[in-house]
């Protein structure tokens, strides 16, 4: 199964921001136990050491869990970050925006491209530049009515929901035609991690997985 097929099958991508080391590994194991098979490690643009930290995190995850999950890089804004992610073993590149140079370099390196877009013009520009998927961002704020309106003329593009995705609305976005979702706060809850309550994160992961499978 190639990475595009993998994303279409498992649908849920956990978005991890500023989580590194053992904390990140424990989180990945807990979510994987609940059926989540993909994780996005984001670049922290405000951290001067962000590229190194993200690359090291992806290398660690690949080393420890390469047989059970696929890992990618998120908040990728330039080709330097694309290259760093590729060198670390990332299999897909996710951005909050549409940058044609980032899309082209991602595809040249054999990775799956998932740029972010909001308007029909941006979505089509991303698709025409070679994106495998387009991340509709911020989906939760835009809402189902917006999605249904734009899906009329551009229903040939594979859209990923990101921003405000919960157990309550995930299924509705899938029914409306989206092929998957990036999920952050519900799956990385800082308070639960600080409490060591990874069982609750596993339970949440299982709920998202059940919705994806149904």
Image (spheres, rainbow, N blue to C red):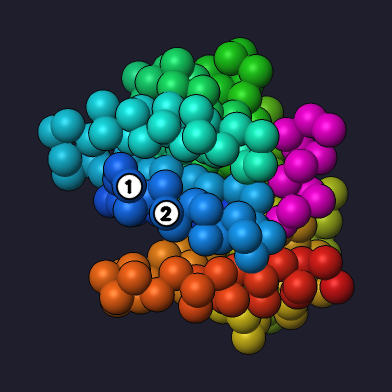
Residue at which label 1 appears: 22
What secondary structure is marked by label 2? helix
Q: Residue 47, percent across and down? A: 16, 40
Q: Residue 86, percent across and down? A: 49, 20
Specify whether residue 57 is in view. yes
Residue at which label 2 appears: 26
Residue at the spot 65% in from the left edge and 50% down from the top edge: 37
Packing grade of label 1 (10 A; few <14, some 14-19, many >=20) is few
Specify whether residue 154 is in view. no
Residue at the spot 62% in from the left edge and 80% down from the top edge: 167
Q: How many numbered marks, from 0 up?
A: 2
Q: Name the magenta segment's main secondary structure.
A: helix
Q: Residue 104, percent across and down? A: 57, 20
Residue 178 in which image quadrant: bottom right
- Quarter of the image for the N terminus: give it: top right
- Quarter of the image for the C terminus: give it: bottom right
User: Is 182 rendered above or below residue 195?
Assistant: above
Q: Which stretch appears magenta?
A: 1-11
Q: Residue 134, percent across and down? A: 64, 47
Q: Tell me if residue 7 is in the magenta stretch.
A: yes
Of the pair 10 and 74, the residue shown nearer to us: 10
User: Is 75 rendered above or below residue 176?
Assistant: above
Q: Are marks 1 and 2 in contact (CB under 8 Å)?
A: yes
User: Is 70 rendered above or below residue 136?
Assistant: above
User: Is 70 rendered above or below residue 200?
Assistant: above
Residue at the spot 59% in from the left edge and 76% down from the top edge: 203
Q: How far is disc 1 from disc 2 in space, using C-alphas?
A: 6 Å
What secondary structure is marked by label 1? helix
Q: Tell me if residue 96 is in the magenta stretch.
A: no
Of the pair 110 and 96, the residue shown nearer to us: 110
Packing grade of label 2 (10 A; few <14, some 14-19, many >=20) is some
């Amino acid at each position: 199964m190639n990475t595009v097929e993998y994303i279409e099958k498992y649908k849920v991508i956990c978005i991890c921001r500023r989580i590194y080391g053992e904390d990140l590994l424990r989180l990945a194991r807990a979510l994987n136990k609940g059926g989540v098979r993909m994780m996005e490690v984001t670049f922290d643009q405000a951290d001067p050491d962000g590229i190194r930290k993200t690359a090291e995190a992806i290398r660690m995850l690949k080393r420890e869990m390469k047989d059970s999950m696929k890992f990618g890089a998120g908040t990728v804004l330039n080709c330097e970050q694309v290259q760093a992610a590729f060198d670390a073993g990332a299999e897909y590149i996710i951005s909050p925006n549409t940058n044609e140079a980032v899309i082209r370099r991602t595809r040249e390196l054999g990775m799956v491209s998932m740029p972010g877009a909001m308007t029909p013009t941006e979505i089509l520009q991303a698709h025409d530049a070679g994106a495998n998927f387009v991340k509709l961002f911020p989906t939760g704020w835009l809402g189902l009515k917006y999605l249904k309106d734009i899906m009329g003329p551009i229903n040939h593009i594979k859209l990923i929901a990101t921003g405000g995705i919960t157990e309550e609305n995930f299924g509705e976005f899938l029914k409306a035609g989206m092929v998957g979702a990036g999920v952050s706060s519900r799956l990385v809850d800082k308070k639960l991690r600080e409490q060591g309550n990874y069982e609750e994160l596993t339970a949440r992961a299982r709920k998202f997985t059940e919705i994806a499978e149904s």
